[in-house]
Image (tube, rainbow, N blue to C red):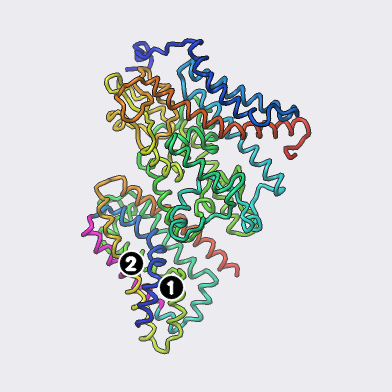
Amino acid sequence: MIQGFLLGLANGTSCLAFCAPIFLPFLLGEGRTVRRNIPLLLQFLAGRLGGYLLFGIAAWQVGRWIQGYASHGLFMGGAYLVLASLLMAYGFTTPKTACAAEGGRQWLSRITARFPSTLPVLLGLLTGLTLCPPFLAAFADASSRASLAGSLAFFFAFFIGTALFFVPLPFTGFLRRFNPVRVVGRLACAITGCFYLYKGLILFYTGFIT
Amino acid sequence: MSDAAISSTQVFPLGKSPGKAILWSLPMLLLSLFMFMGAAGVPKDPLRMIPLLITFALVNVLFFLMIYTGKTDRYRAVFFVTMSVLFVISFMAHFLEARGSMSLSAGEMIKGRTPFCHMVIPMTLIPAALTKTIIFPGSILGPYSIATMFALWIGASLALGRGFCSWGCFFGGLEDGFSRIRRKPLIRKISDRWTYLPYAVLAAVVLLSAVLLSPVYCEWLCPFKTVTEYAQVTSFKTLVQVIIFTSLFAGLVVVLPILTRRRTQCGLFCPMGAFQGFTNKLNPFEIRIDRAVCKDCGKCVRECPTFSLDDAAVSLGGTKLSCMKCGKCVDGCPTGAVHYHVKGTAVPASPSRARMLFIYPAFLFLAVFGGSMIQDGLYRLLLLLTRGTMIQ
């Protein structure tokens, strides 16, 4: 476990760098206070932990299969496409109170109004599934563990090590009084979504033809 | 109150005096003479001499007219649009000469031969601070190099702030030209929400570039790749990239400016422009509106090509951070309430003096920066006409 924690600490800045383009615009877009940003961060981290533990299981049980599949791009491409759709839907829709009379429109507002944790948890889960360099290092290490518990503990410790770097993010709540920051945050989410859409499409296509 | 009614109550006399205008234009004439002919003199080759003389004449005639008529944007735009069109011709010819193609191969990138333009600057700053490297496959010195562009950008930012986008950016002139094709816009109302998009693009590309250690905007979003260079189509990825570049160029630089009469790429998309907006805070020049004279006709809001004026800004007597100091609102204001202003002085404190203090460095920068592009572009066109090829 210590090994996983240290690996997380050593690679935390990279993890933050990979997740910040997705989570930071989301936080700015929500425009909440520092105190109300903390639950959002916890939900995001819970999602990330979920993603990590899923990989912990995968690493132990079907490590080779997943790795081979991921290298083909279908798996990663799919994850990127879902992430891109969420970010774009969040960025390009105007937030307002959900109304039953609106039918299919504002579906994201309706879902998030009913289950407020959905979006941060999903973003966390999908970024947790992203194969960034430190995550690949942890994956390689965990896949060599003999037991499922060992693999999960390794990923949990890795998560704790990286999560420390996310602590300053709720302080972006200080910017909430400046209203344009919310609009910019949401639109930046959408632009980041477009980028992941390209990446997802290319990975998916490459995975499909190989 | 209608524009015509306001025009009849015009309170800002232009005071046209050819003698004064010639005197004011004289320093520009001498400076441009030194710039264009100082070191090597007039070339003997007519294909080189004609472009030089045309550029010299263009600089001085336009500057004289700017002083004589008191109109800024009208004559700035002529030079600005000419510079951008001829820049494209000159750039294409250079790269056809050097590579035989406008497309950029992986080999050229590995050799560090990718030309560096100012659009990359915001993306390079965080990685440069963190890793002490420039995340761009270009060369440090030489033409289109990283050092040259950084030096030009710092100088332009200090002298002009975001005025660089209207007085120096060789891409801006293309959409400036397209935005002037129709006399009246077909699309008038654009939601204010979209004016924040450049800041969002800036935030996204800066963060993603810092993560991926590559200039994300150049790889995925630059509309101007269409008319300069683009990745050689060798895979599905490069095909997608080229489709994106072409679509963004067609949409943001050609179609939307024609339909809206506004610079939509600069005002609604360009991350460098958003970044450059912050340099308006460092720069001593700005556009101010004299509330005592303003009749709230809204003409400046309708005319502003860069979405930098709205009713709230007008009521506060200034422009938004995104103002590019093109001077269109100054030219168009029927009461002369909109004017150039030097920060720290009273409003209105000698608006014509403030205008002169701004347009001298601004036009000189445009002439120095754009003059060589215009000369080379004209030379390539003459080569094409006389020898049937733009390549030397």
- Can the viewer see residue B162? no
Q: Is residue B70 left or right of residue A159?
A: right
Residue type (three-letter) at the residue carrying disc 1 = Phe
- Where's residue B241, x and y in %? 56, 53
Q: Are marks 1 and 2 on the same chain?
A: yes
Work out which residue is located at the far front of the displayed protein and give it: B39
Name the mark on residue A165. 2
Marks 1 and 2 sit apart, C-alpha to C-alpha, by: 15 Å
Q: Secondary structure at mark 1?
A: helix
Q: Nearer the viewer, mark 1 or mark 2?
A: 2
Q: Which residue is mark 1?
A: A135
Q: Nearer the viewer, residue B238 or B106?
A: B106
Question: Image quadrant for the C terminus of chain B?
Answer: top right
Which image quarter: residue A82? bottom left
- Can the viewer see residue B185? yes
Majority secondary structure of magenta residues = helix
Residue type (three-letter) at the residue carrying disc 2 = Phe
Magenta stretch? A33-55
Q: Is residue B22 left or right of residue B114?
A: left
